[in-house]
Amino acid sequence: MLRSLLIPLGILSAIVLAVPDLVVMGYFFLVIPGLILTIIPTVFVYLLATFLIRPIVPLSSRVGANVIAFGLALVLGFVVMLPWRMIEIRRFEQAALSDIAASPTLRLTGNVLVDFPPNRYCSTPTMTCDHRCTALLDTPGVESVTKVSGYDAATFQRGPHAPGTLAQPDQPQKIMDAFDRIDGPHAMRRIVGRRHLDRTLQADWALRIAQGDTLREHTPLGRKHIDWRVIYQEDHRPGEPSVQRLEIRDPTDAVKARRSLVQHRVPAPLFYFGFHGAMNNARFTVGGTTYSNQPRHFDFDPDVELLRLTQIPRPHPAPDSVERMEQKLAETLDDPNATDAQLLLAPMWLKLFQYEAGQDQIDTIAKILLDDRIADPHEPLRTTLRSNTDLTALRAGLAKRCLAADEPQARSWYVSALVGLPEATFAQPSADERAIWDRATSVPEAAPFLERLADQGAVVVPELLGILDQVVEKPWHERFRVVHGIREAFMRLGPNAAMASPHIRSLLAERPSPLTQSAEDRLQWLVALARMGVPVEELPYDSWVTGPSDLQRHSKRIHRQLKRYEAEHRTEPG
């Protein structure tokens, strides 16, 4: 009987272990099939063990021998798991250091070191004075904050006589998230008020810096000068206990406060196959439970724990800070003798907006772009402007900053903003705009701006063809941006570019064509030719069309692309 069960169970076990998504489907359609598929591998293992143990059981009764063999199989499942289980429990206990709650809460003073691991979600690894740094610098008695993150370190101080180079606070308002989490779920109802509070806190820092209470960065202080150390550790190595731990140590390196979350997967006392995951990551594992040193669903937030363990005060910026900052910024932009600290008002003001700045702020942004004393503001500008805002007033500043930018990312952003300006903006181009066009074949980020040569009408068609002939012999990775920019210019020109269609058709006829690298490239060139006046039925489809049905299908496709282009063209600002 056991032998007759083992064969189908073995086959089913192999199938579900190889394709665990079948179990998910079983749960999805009917719960019972999912449960059955989940336990089949475990049942097979114990029946196989029973079958192998049965011959050595000295009983004549078949039923009794099977029962004893099955019992021994269960004992074997326990014995096999016991050493592994004890090892993992010991590893968990070693990692789960006891929490230390300071009473009363710690008052940090002097020079504080904050050691947090690098933020793996942050694309800019530069060392900045973040919300923890600013909150500590606003704590009475704290003289400096030394930030350590991986191999990087820097010390930040504030005050009129602080040494080092000027720095900007990095999202000081984020500390309010931790205070809200301490207050509980009801704090989420104050989201509108929180947005205003965030902006006033940012503005308050900007005003203090402009008024001489500067924030400065310098080389990190040595260990002997540190009075307190705030250390946050994370360890999520596979197979090891998962650890999140915040410790606060005094100058003698004694731990004065500790809070941690330690979790570790510990095998079950008895062997079985556990099932985890959903359709995209379903899998079988050896059964077990997750041990934790905290209650279930505990969410460890190092910022919250830092506030609970120390006497960091909640910020209370003046309610009119934003209005006073805007007034001070206007005065600074008009002041030829403004200090470097005052000029920091510009980028810090841009950071007040999260895709919220509109026409009311455009004039100020235009002044910032044209002011040579202000460092390249493209980074905050990327998250400042509301979509569909008419940026025509920024035209001169965008062109100027594009020419001056050192970073490719900055040049790309400025060119993209210029390309998006309303129709006919560049009918009378400035010297800076002409300079960008002159760089189109040598500076990759400038090439998309060729599209806006079309604003000058049919007179530029020979110039566009001349540029195209300059680059067709270059490798594709060097010419594709120029080719795409010229194609978009012809699309904008429409029938005004009709004189260029024979040359474009001849280039498309070459094998390989210097204008295309993919079927999508060819499709867009066919749309451009249709815009230039070539009848859709007479476009150079080449191998795409082998009969009337192919022609009809591709003609409909071109008509759809034309309608889409014309619809988008009509919705441009202006």
Image (cartoon, grey):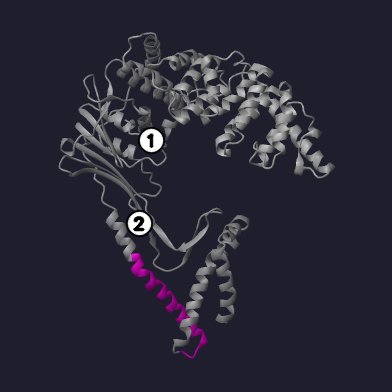
Badge 2: how crowded within 10 Å, few (<14), some, or many (20+)? some
Badge 1: how crowded within 10 Å, few (<14), some, or many (20+)? some
Q: Which residue is mark 1?
A: 181
Identify the element where label 2 is drawn. loop
Nearer the observer, 177 or 550: 550
Q: Which residue is mark 2?
A: 240
Q: Position of residue 70 (x, y in %)?
A: 47, 78
Nearer the observer, 511 or 350: 511
Specify the principal SS of the magenta part: helix
- In magenta, the rendered stretch is 59-85
Q: Amino acid at mark 2?
A: Glu
The verdict on residue 64 being magenta is: yes
Q: Position of residue 339 (x, y in %)?
A: 31, 14
Q: Residue at x 40, y 11 (%)?
A: 330
Q: Position of residue 205 (x, y in %)?
A: 33, 21
Identify the element where label 1 is drawn. helix
Nearer the observer, 540 or 571: 540
Q: CA distance from mark 1 to mark 2?
A: 29 Å
Q: Amino acid at mark 1?
A: Arg
